[in-house]
Structures are given as C-alpha cells and as structure tokens.
C-alpha cells in the first residue's frame, strides 16, 4: 500500500502558511497569488489549523461579513483531521470522504510538513494505476 510519504515525495512538501491575526482578505490574496485553495494557519509559531475557500464562503460571504475586517483566526478550522507520513493513501481517502473535506495537513512532531488535497490523491492514484498497468502489460508481453 502506498503511503502519504510517497505522495509528498512526488508532489513536494511546499506549505503556504498564514497567521491567525491576518485578515481574511490577506489570506484570499495569498491563495489567489499561489493558486491554492487552503492555507495552513499558525499562531506565534504554533500550528493551529487550516483555512480553506470553503471556510471563506460559509463563514464570511454567506454571513455578510467583511473579509477586510474578519481575521483568519475567526473562520479557520481548529485542529482539523490530519495524517502522518506513514498513513496510507486509502486512509486519506477514507478521512476525506467521511468528513467531507478536501485538505489534510501532514503532521510530524506537531509541525505541518505537507498538505494533501483531494486532487493530489486522485492524481497520485491514477498515476500509480497507470504504472501498474504498464508493468502488467510488459510482464504479459514478455518484457522486463
């Protein structure tokens, strides 16, 4: 079974962070600049949670709040579900499906060392299946 460590190795472990004290507008600008849908949130050097586009839609826009006046710490998800390097890709899919979430922080020693999205998982699984098919075709045809 493939592990989260395999996915992070292939995708990279770049994580974009923001402080709880920043405005939601600042967070949105950062997400647009980086073309991402989630940020890892820290407070005074300690991991606190994540903020996603969904948090913005549900906790700011729909409630009529102003993104310039609302802080990341007010809408972020505290202590979201997370995984570790040794967890399986299947476990990630289970968690995301059961909790209806799109992002999972990867933790090591209480620090975020990666962020896995549903898209990352789908791409990884598809690539893995493609490689398996190629190996089987080579085996069947007598190749190496």
Image (tube, rainbow, N blue to C red):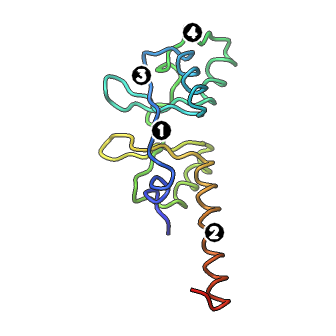
Give coordinates of residue 140: x percent, y percent.
Answer: 66, 89
Callout 4: few (<14), some (14-19), or many (20+) C-alpha neighbours within 10 Å? few
Residue reaching furthest to the bottom = 142
Give coordinates of residue 86: x percent, y percent.
Answer: 40, 59
Q: CA separation, marks 3 and 1?
A: 16 Å
Mark whose residue sits in front, 1 or 2: 2
The earlier-in-sequence mark between 2 and 3 is 3
Q: CB under 8 Å between callouts 3 and 1?
A: no
Q: Is residue 75 left or right of residue 47?
A: right
Task: Classify mark 3: helix, strand or loop.
Answer: strand
The earlier-in-sequence mark between 3 and 4 is 3
Residue 68: which disc? 4
Give coordinates of residue 127: x percent, y percent.
Answer: 62, 63
Q: CA separation, marks 1 and 2?
A: 29 Å
Task: Classify mark 2: helix, strand or loop.
Answer: helix
Q: CA separation, marks 2 and 3?
A: 38 Å
Please give the residue where the numbered disc 1 appears in the rendered image.
Answer: 80
The earlier-in-sequence mark between 1 and 4 is 4
Q: Is residue 27 left or right of residue 138?
A: left
- On screen, 107 above or below 137? above
The earlier-in-sequence mark between 3 and 1 is 3
Q: Say which residue appears at 45% left-offset and 40% top-offset.
A: 14
Hey, which quadrant is residue 139 in on the image? Answer: bottom right
């Amino acid at each position: 079974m493939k592990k989260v460590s395999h996915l992070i190795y292939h995708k990279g472990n770049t994580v974009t962070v923001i402080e709880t004290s920043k405005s939601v507008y600042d967070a949105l600008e950062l997400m647009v600049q980086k073309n991402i849908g989630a940020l890892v949130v820290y407070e005074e050097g300690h991991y606190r949670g994540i903020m996603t586009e969904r948090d913005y839609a549900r906790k700011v826009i729909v409630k009529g709040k102003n993104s310039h006046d609302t802080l990341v710490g007010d809408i972020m998800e505290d202590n979201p579900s997370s995984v570790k390097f040794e967890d399986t890709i299947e476990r990630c899919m289970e968690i995301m499906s059961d909790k209806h979430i799109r992002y999972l922080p990867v933790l090591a020693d209480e620090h975020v060392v990666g962020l896995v999205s549903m898209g990352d998982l789908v791409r990884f699984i598809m690539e893995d299946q493609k490689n398996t098919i190629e190996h089987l075709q080579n085996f069947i045809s007598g190749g190496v």
